[in-house]
């Protein structure tokens, strides 16, 4: 095995290792409760990671046993996968760039509005909300809020860091979108009285938001019909996708460098092969 093939084999082993964080990011996304309901980015990332693993393994085999045809196929497939990975990253950053969150005085959690997220994500969630709502209501995302956090007073609850899915809202200011307050509690502007994290009574301002009338103390209903629940779900998805993108960016940068060096090594290997043939012919 020539020096260039040695280099290519080592690079492909590193590329094989780079597929691990991609697969890990996909598995991490798939394990999240909201992604189990949305099923939007679960499998594409895992499938892309597995393909990177298989292609890198093929490149390693081609370099180690000096199979030039396999190496050429590896370079072509790896280029296509890197392009797909970059497209996915650009798309993920584009649709998760709008945040939709606002800090609220006196609250440890941020509040959200549905109109603050990208139009593509809003439309996707809205179009599939019947299935998503059924999945969320059958989960324990709200029930465990009261079970795992035995809040004694409203002040203790308001100072708790809740996930966007559990509590999201907008400040009581005019915004040309629906104000929202997550799936597990009614909007703050409605003025509901706190009893426990999923039980609220006697709204003082029931006309302040359309979601005020949609809130139900039925534990299977809560605010799953609210626009606030959609916004909370989008807030959760945005946070998770942004975290997963870190691993994907690192993998993409390393794979691009591996591919560039691999192309150079492949050309050098072809030159070495031609030189060996020339020497044999000359001898």
Image (cartoon, rainbow, N blue to C red):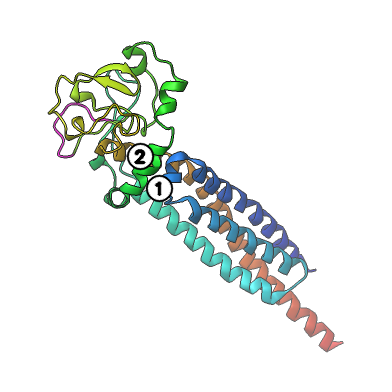
Label 2: state its secondary structure. Answer: helix
Looking at the image, residue 211 sits to the left or right of residue 281; the answer is left
Label pair 1/2, CB-CB below 8 angstroms: yes
| Rendered view: 148 above or below 140 | above
- Residue 27, position in %: x, y? 55, 46
Looking at the image, residue 159 sits to the left or right of residue 51; the answer is left
| Rendered view: 47 above or below 155 | below
Q: Residue at x 45, y 22 (%)?
A: 147
Q: Mark 1 = which residue?
A: 38
| Rendered view: 120 above or below 267 | above
What is the number of the mark on residue 233?
2
Q: Residue at x 41, y 38 (%)?
A: 138
Q: Residues within 10 Å of mark 2 (few under 14, many from 20)?
A: many
> Which of the 4 image quarters holds residue 15?
bottom right
Q: CA distance from mark 1 to mark 2?
A: 9 Å
Give the quadrant of the N terminus: bottom right
Q: Residues within 10 Å of mark 1 (few under 14, many from 20)?
A: many
Give the quadrant of the C terminus: bottom right
- Residue 237, position in %: x, y? 40, 42
Label 1: state its secondary structure. Answer: helix
- Residue 198, position in %: x, y? 34, 24
**Residue at the outermost right position:** 283
Indicate yes or no whether the magenta region holds residue 237.
Answer: no
Q: Residue at x 50, y 54 (%)?
A: 43
- Residue 73, position in %: x, y? 62, 73
Q: Main secondary structure of the magenta part?
A: loop
- Comparing 230 with 268, the one in front is 230
What residue range appears in magenta?
169-177
> Which of the 4 image quarters holds residue 229?
top left
């Amino acid at each position: 095995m020539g020096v260039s093939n040695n280099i290519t084999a080592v690079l492909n082993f590193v590329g094989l290792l780079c597929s691990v964080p991609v697969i890990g990011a996909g598995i991490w996304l798939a394990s999240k409760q909201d992604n189990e309901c949305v099923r939007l980015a679960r499998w594409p990332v895992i499938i892309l990671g597995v393909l990177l693993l298989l292609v890198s393994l093929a490149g390693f085999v081609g370099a180690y046993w000096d199979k030039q045809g396999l190496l050429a196929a590896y370079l072509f497939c790896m280029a296509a996968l890197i392009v797909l990975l970059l497209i996915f990253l650009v798309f993920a950053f584009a649709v998760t760039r709008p945040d939709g969150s606002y800090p609220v005085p006196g609250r440890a959690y941020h509040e959200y509005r549905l109109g603050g997220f990208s139009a593509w994500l809003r439309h996707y969630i809205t179009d599939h909300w019947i299935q998503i709502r059924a999945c969320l209501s059958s989960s324990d995302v709200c029930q465990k809020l009261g079970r795992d956090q035995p809040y004694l007073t409203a002040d203790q609850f308001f100072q708790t860091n809740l996930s966007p899915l559990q509590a999201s809202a907008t400040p009581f200011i005019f915004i040309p979108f629906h104000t929202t307050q997550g799936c597990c509690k009614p909007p703050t502007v409605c003025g509901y009285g706190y009893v426990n994290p999923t039980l609220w009574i006697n709204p003082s301002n029931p006309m302040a938001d359309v979601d005020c009338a949609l809130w139900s103390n039925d534990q299977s209903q809560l605010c799953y019909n609210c626009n606030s629940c959609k916004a909370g779900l989008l807030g959760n998805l945005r946070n998770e996708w942004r975290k997963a993108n870190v691993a994907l960016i690192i993998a993409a940068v390393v794979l691009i460098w591996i591919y560039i060096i691999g192309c150079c090594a492949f050309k050098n290997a072809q030159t070495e092969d031609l030189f060996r043939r020339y020497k044999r012919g000359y001898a």
